[in-house]
Image: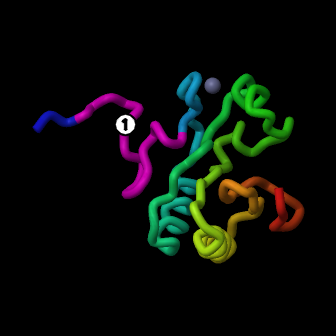
Amino acid sequence: MVEDQSASKMRVSVHFTKEELQCPCCGLFEFTPGTIVKIEMIRRGYGKPMPINSGTRCKARNTKVGGSKTSFHMKSLAIDVECSSSYDKFDLVREAIAKKANGIVVYDWGIHIDFGDRPRNMLKKG
Ligand SMILES: [Zn+2]
């Protein structure tokens, strides 16, 4: 068996690789170990795969995908997770709140979770 040793496939936690969480256009990755731990704890509580639609975004990428100008994706403080049902969305929101996410946005395709610095935590519809 040949191990894949490319840096982008590097595992940053039990369930996540650097490739999933870095900017797809330039590889930018500034997730701190503390944020990775929070994401991994959410994954464990959720108990299901968490397909990452968007992790880190450089400024150019954020503009391209229409992200907010102050998006926490640009600071590696946010993930967008694809969910296939409302049940999954509910479970993921519950776990994100339990693990002290500061920002949660519910979209048609899934859930945005962030650990940004906000005056108070937020749960809203996108
Ligand atoms: Zn980029």
Vertically, is 81 above or below 7? below
* In this rendering, position of residue 37 left or right of residue 54: left
Residue 110 visible within the image: yes
The number of callouts visible is: 1
In the rendered image, which quarter contains the N terminus? top left
Q: Amino acid at mark 1?
A: Lys
Vertically, is 61 above or below 122? above
Q: Which residue is mark 1?
A: 9
**Image quarter where ligand 1 lies:** top right
Question: In terms of image quadrants, where is residue 81?
Answer: bottom right
Question: Image point 59% across, 60% down: which residue?
Answer: 83
Residue 14 lies within the magenta run: yes
In the rendered image, which quarter contains the C terminus? bottom right
**Residue 59 x, y percent position in the rendering:** 74, 27
Question: Image point 25% across, 34% down: which residue?
Answer: 4
**Residue 7 x, y percent position in the rendering:** 37, 30
Q: What is the magenta range? A: 4-21
